[in-house]
Image (cartoon, rainbow, N blue to C red):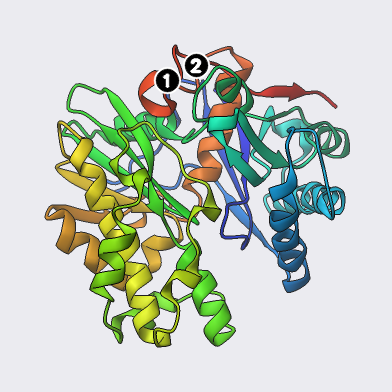
């Protein structure tokens, strides 16, 4: 088994997730708890972004709209890339110190970086962050640019985590058809058939629109627990219009850029009704995704920040009509699942194992990926 750290900073721009796992690239080391569920795979850590950090990253997202080639860094993007690299390095250094580890105790780091552009139809997905600089500072090999090979081969470059989801499901003993829904800024689903086959794709907006709405209307970064949405009423006419967007009619695999939809679509609705409408949009987009699925999951496991939104979970249960649980409830980590996944992907990449597949990203054949930088 290899010791690997995974790093994830998602489209919600909240901070850096850090997770350590042990894996051989195929299976993962787990411990069964007394309740029959998994104990945590390994230690985790978190480095929150400050308001100034988030302001710079939001400006970088805006400036990134001008990118026409993946190596371009217009506007404030050079400063944002330096910031992302430095904050990820600080996150790892603090994590190692807190857990009594040294760089020599870690074999590889999987570094996702911060997505600023995702346009697979143009064969472009840009994650800022300098993997080589991170490797030099930390003294640990770093695998980054994990989407690049898939994008260049005609795939969507997303989602990347399904192969980890399958390894985790196997380790947990699941044999029935299973859906794993990660609700970050964008929501993505991994569907594992009863025969082990994978199908994965972005379902639609996740938390991003809700968070943007709450920040604009209240100054708060999110709808804590979904309580604001629970006090509102969805605008059914607006929802019907949103759900006829061509994205939802496309067959998977497919992926979504954070900026394809805007919280401003909720317009002049009250704070409560706008939150209710955007929350319903996320839930109903997941239900729409099942239009394209031959074997609907018998059970859903929800991870990501959306797993803490009680109103969103309530709506998912209503629309999906099957058992729904959170990752935390079965011993997985709702907060750190993606960071754990990027640790697993880094090990697979180092070993030349595939990390993307025709039914996860739409690429023509199984693909490995990633760019390895040594200290």
Q: Is residue 327 left or right of residue 41?
A: left
Picture coordinates of residue 273 (x, y %)?
34, 82
Q: Is residue 150 rendered to the left or right of residue 269?
A: right
Say which quadrant the C terminus sits in. top right
Identify the residue at image location x=50%, y=53%. 260
How many marks do you count on the picture? 2
Are the residues flagged by discs 2 and 1 in contact, CB closer than 8 Å? yes
Q: Tell me if I can see residue 50 in this picture.
A: yes
User: Up-down: is 233 above or below 176?
Assistant: below
Residue 330 x, y percent position in the rendering: 30, 51
Residue 354 - label: 2
Q: Residue at x 73, y 70 (%)?
A: 50
Mark 2 against mark 1, which lies toward the viewer? 1
Q: Position of residue 203 (x, y in %)?
A: 35, 46
Crowding at mark 2 (Cα within 10 Å: few <14, some 14-19, many 20+): some
Q: Is residue 38 visible?
A: no
Residue 235 in the image: above or below residue 17? below
Which residue is more in the foreground, 202 or 261? 261
Residue beneath the point at 54% across and 86% down: 218
Q: Helix, strand, or loop for circle 1?
A: loop
Q: CA distance from mark 2 to mark 1?
A: 7 Å
Label number found at residue 256: none
**SS type, badge 2:** loop
Quarter location, residue 59? bottom right
| Label 1 neighbour load within 10 Å: few <14, some 14-19, many 20+ | many
Residue at 47% x, 23% y: name it: 356
Return the residue nearer the eye: 367 or 61: 61
Position in image of residue 270 (x %, y %): 40, 88
According to the picture, the residue beneath numbered tag 1 turns out to be 357
Left or right, residue 271 beside residue 11 = left
Figure quadrant of the N terminus: top right
């Amino acid at each position: 088994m290899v010791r690997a750290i995974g790093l994830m900073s998602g489209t919600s721009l909240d901070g850096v997730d850090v997770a350590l796992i042990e894996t051989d690239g195929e299976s993962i080391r787990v411990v069964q708890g007394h309740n029959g569920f998994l104990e945590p795979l390994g230690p985790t850590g978190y480095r929150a972004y400050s308001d100034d950090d988030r302001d710079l990253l939001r400006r970088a997202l805006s400036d990134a709209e001008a990118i026409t080639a993946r190596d371009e860094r217009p506007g404030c993007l050079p400063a944002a890339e330096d910031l992302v690299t430095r904050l990820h390095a600080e996150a790892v250094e603090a994590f190692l110190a807190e857990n009594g580890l040294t760089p020599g105790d870690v074999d590889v780091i999987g570094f996702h970086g911060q997505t600023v552009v995702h346009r697979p139809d143009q064969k472009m997905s840009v994650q800022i962050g300098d993997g080589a600089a991170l490797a030099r500072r930390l003294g640990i090999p770093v695998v980054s640019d994990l989407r690049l090979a898939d994008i260049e081969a005609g795939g969507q470059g997303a989602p990347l985590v399904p192969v980890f989801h399958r390894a985790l499901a196997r380790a947990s003993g699941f044999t029935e058809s299973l859906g794993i829904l990660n609700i970050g800024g964008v929501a993505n689903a991994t569907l594992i058939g009863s025969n082990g086959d994978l199908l994965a794709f972005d379902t639609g907006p996740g938390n991003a629109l809700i968070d943007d709405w709450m920040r604009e209307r209240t100054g708060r970064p999110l709808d804590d627990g979904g309580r604001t949405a629970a006090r509102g009423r969805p605008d059914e006419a607006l929802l019907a219009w949103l759900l006829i967007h061509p994205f939802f009619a496309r067959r998977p695999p497919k992926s979504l850029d954070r900026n394809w939809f805007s919280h401003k679509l909720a317009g002049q609705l009250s704070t409560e009704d706008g939150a209710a409408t955007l929350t319903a949009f996320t839930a109903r987009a997941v239900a729409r995704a099942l239009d394209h699925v031959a074997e609907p999951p018998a059970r859903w496991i929800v991870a990501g920040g959306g797993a803490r939104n009680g109103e969103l979970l309530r709506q998912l249960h209503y629309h999906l009509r099957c058992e729904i649980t959170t990752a935390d409830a079965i011993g997985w980590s709702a907060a750190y699942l993606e960071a754990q996944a990027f640790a697993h992907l880094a090990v697979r990449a180092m070993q030349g194992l595939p990390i993307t597949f025709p039914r996860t990203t739409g690429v023509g054949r199984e693909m490995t990926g990633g760019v390895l930088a040594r200290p």
